[in-house]
Image (cartoon, rainbow, N blue to C red):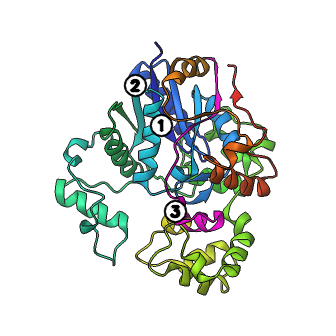
Amino acid sequence: MLKSVGIIAEYNPFHNGHKYQIDMAKKQTNADLAVVIMSGNWVQRGQPAILDKWTRAQMALKNGADMVIELPIKSAVQPADIFAKHAVNILTELGCNYLSFGSENPNLDFDSLKDLKLDDSNNFKDYSKSYPELIQELIKKKTGQVIDQPNDILALNYYIANRNNNNAMQLVPIKRIESQHHAKELNENSQYTSASSIRSKLINNDLGEISHYIPNMLSDNQLDNVVTWDDFWPLLKYKIITTDVDELSQIYQMSEGLQYRLKKYIVQADSFEEFLDLIKTKRYTYPRLQRLLVYTLLNWKQNDSASKEYVRILGFNKLGRSYLKQVKDNLSIPLVAKVNKNLSENELELDVTAGRLYGNVHSQEQDFGKVPIIYNF
C-alpha cells in the first residue's frame, strides 16, 4: 500500500519554497508520494491566480508533487476556517496518511487551542476590530500564544479541521524558510523569496529577475500570460452599476449594508485598487472585501454557499496514477477527470462559470475539453 502526504496549496505561483516543503514533507514522513490539493483560478484571499491552474499544476508536478487536485471554488475562496475544513476533508477522502503545511512557528502547541470556540459569535462582538484581530486576541487571552502570521493562522485551522475528522491525518508542520509572507521586493540574498514579490515581477514581465526563485521554470510564453484583478475591473464595474441594491443584497456574504457601499463608490473609482480602498473599513479586511467582489462577479448567491466536495484531478505522474487506483473505490464523493455538460450544470456549475470568466481574459479554455496532465519524469 502506498503511503501519501497531503499538502494544501495555492502555488501563486510555484517557487523554491514550495519545492522545499514538498521535499521535506516526503523526507520527514517517508511517504511514497505527495498529494497536493490546490486552489484553482481564484485563490483564498479573493484574487485571480496570477497563472492559470493548469500551468501551476504542471509546475508542481515538475517539482515533486505526484498528484494535483483542484479545490472547488466554493471551498477555495473562503475564510481560513472554511478553506481549511474542505481541503482537509478531501485529503482525508483520498486516504492521506499525513498532512504537511508551512508554518512560521512549527512548534506551536496546537493541543492548547483545542477547546477554543472560534465559531462562537459571542467571542466576536467588538465591531471596531476585524475578525482576524479578534481571533488573535482570543487565542492570546486563552493560551498566551501569539498567532498572527498567515501560515500559522491557516495551520491552526488545519489542526481544527483535522481534529474533527474521524480519520485524522498525522500533522507535519514544516518551518518556512522566508517569513516575509507578503514582501513585495525580491530577497536578493537568498534563493527563497515571497510569492508576492514574484507576482510583482511577473506582472511587469521581468522574467529574468525571477528565474533564480522558480525551480525548473517553464517557458516564457507560459509565464507571460498573467492575470490580475485589473483584467476583471470593467466587468465588475458593469456588474455593480447594472445590478440593483436588492439583488446585490442576495450575494453571498453581502452583509451590514455593504451593497450600498459598493453602489456608492463604484461610480467614483477609476481602477480596482482605488475601488477597494474606497470601500475599505476598519471592520473588513482587504481579503474579506476581495472575496465579496469575487462572489459579486460570479453572481454567487447566499443559497449557493454550501460546498459540494469532489475530487477534480488536474494532473498526476505514474505514482499518482497508481495511488488513485488504490483509493478511488473507497471515495464517497465524486471523482472528476473531465468536465461534461451534466457536471457543468450541477456540481461544477460555479467552478465552470469562474473558469469561463478567467479563460475570457486568459484566452484559454479552463474546463471543457481539458484532461488531467500526465507528467512523465
- In the picture shown, does residue 39 fall above or below 6? below
- In the image, what residue occupies the spot 54% across and 76% down? 249
Foreground pick, 17 / 309: 309
Q: Would you name the residue on which mark 2 appears?
A: 97
Q: Quadrant of residue 301?
A: bottom right
Would residue 327 be found to the left or right of residue 247 on screen?
left
What are the residue bounds of the magenta stretch?
291-318
Foreground pick, 273 / 94: 94
Q: Would you name the residue on which mark 3 appears?
A: 303
Q: CA distance from mark 1 to mark 3?
A: 22 Å
Q: Is residue 77 magenta?
A: no
Q: Is residue 305 magenta?
A: yes
Return the disc, 1 or 3, that comes first in the chain's sequence.
1
Q: Would you name the residue on which mark 1 appears?
A: 90
Return the disc, 2 or 1, that comes first in the chain's sequence.
1
Mark 1 surroundings: few (<14), some (14-19) or many (≥20) residues within 10 A: many
Q: Amino acid at mark 1?
A: Ile
Mark 2 vs mark 1, foreground winner is: 1
Q: Quadrant of residue 354?
A: bottom right
- In the image, what residue occupies the spot 69% across and 47% down? 344
Q: Amino acid at mark 3?
A: Asn
- In the picture shown, does residue 271 fall above or below 375? below
Q: Quadrant of residue 256?
A: bottom left
- In the image, what residue occupies the spot 36% across and 30% down? 169
- Can residue 359 be spotted in the picture? yes
Location of residue 251 in the rendering, given as x and y in whole percent from the top left corner: 55, 69
Would residue 91 be found to the left or right of residue 360 on screen?
left
- Can residue 150 be spotted in the picture? no
